[in-house]
Image (cartoon, rainbow, N blue to C red):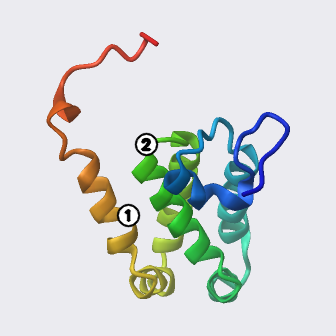
Amino acid sequence: MDKNRDGIADLGSAPLAAEFGVQVKDCLLQITCCCLMVEVLHNSQDLNAALKVLQEEGILSSVLATTEAFFKSRQGISYVYSSLLLLTKIAESETGAGMLINSNLTSHLCLVLTSCYSREDSFQPRNLLAK
């Protein structure tokens, strides 16, 4: 597993974070990539071609797998937020929605998100300002 100088999991090993308990503090490159992809899709002259590239190059499956790993480990909320914005942008078109269905979005994210609320303490009030 690749680590940076702080011992934090490298970007390429984010799905491994959940498996090996690696604490991921910053995901700035991943967040930036998601934001850039949203902008590319937003400004693309040929949206279907841009979506096809996301699927063929494995970007969509990588985003889904990484987001699932962060959901499971309950870490990287900034990345999860950015990736969900990207997935929402993809789903705006019929082609993109079809891609998400074919990529098995439900098993990657919906079931994992549901499990976040299955614990007894999930609905207890929390002080978000306390550390």
Q: Secondary structure at mark 1?
A: helix
Q: Is residue 123 above or below residue 1?
A: above
The image's mark for residue 13 is none
The residue at 52%/68% (across/down) is: 65
Picture coordinates of residue 22, whole percent (x, y) = 59, 44
Label 1 vs label 2: CA separation?
A: 13 Å
Report the quarter where the N terminus lies.
bottom right
Residue 84 in view here? no
Is 116 displayed left or right of 42 in the figure? Answer: left
The nearer-to-camera label among 1 and 2 is 2
Residue 25 in view here? yes
Q: Quadrant of residue 97?
A: bottom left
Picture coordinates of residue 9, whole percent (x, y) = 70, 47
Question: In this view of the protein, which residue sits in the foreground, 43 or 53?
Answer: 53
User: Which residue position is annotated with label 2?
Assistant: 74
The earlier-in-sequence mark between 1 and 2 is 2
Q: Residues within 10 Å of mark 2 (few under 14, many from 20)?
A: few
User: Which residue position is annotated with label 1?
Assistant: 109
Is 85 displayed left or right of 57 in the figure? Answer: left
Residue type, mark 2 in image = Arg
Q: Quadrant of residue 50?
A: bottom right
Question: In this view of the protein, which residue sits in the foreground, 11 or 38?
Answer: 11
* Label pair 1/2, CB-CB below 8 angstroms: no
Q: Secondary structure at mark 2?
A: loop
The residue at 32%/73% (across/down) is: 106
Picture coordinates of residue 79, whole percent (x, y) = 58, 48
Of all residues, the one furthest to the right in this rendering is: 5
Question: In this view of the protein, which residue sits in the foreground, 107 or 91?
Answer: 107
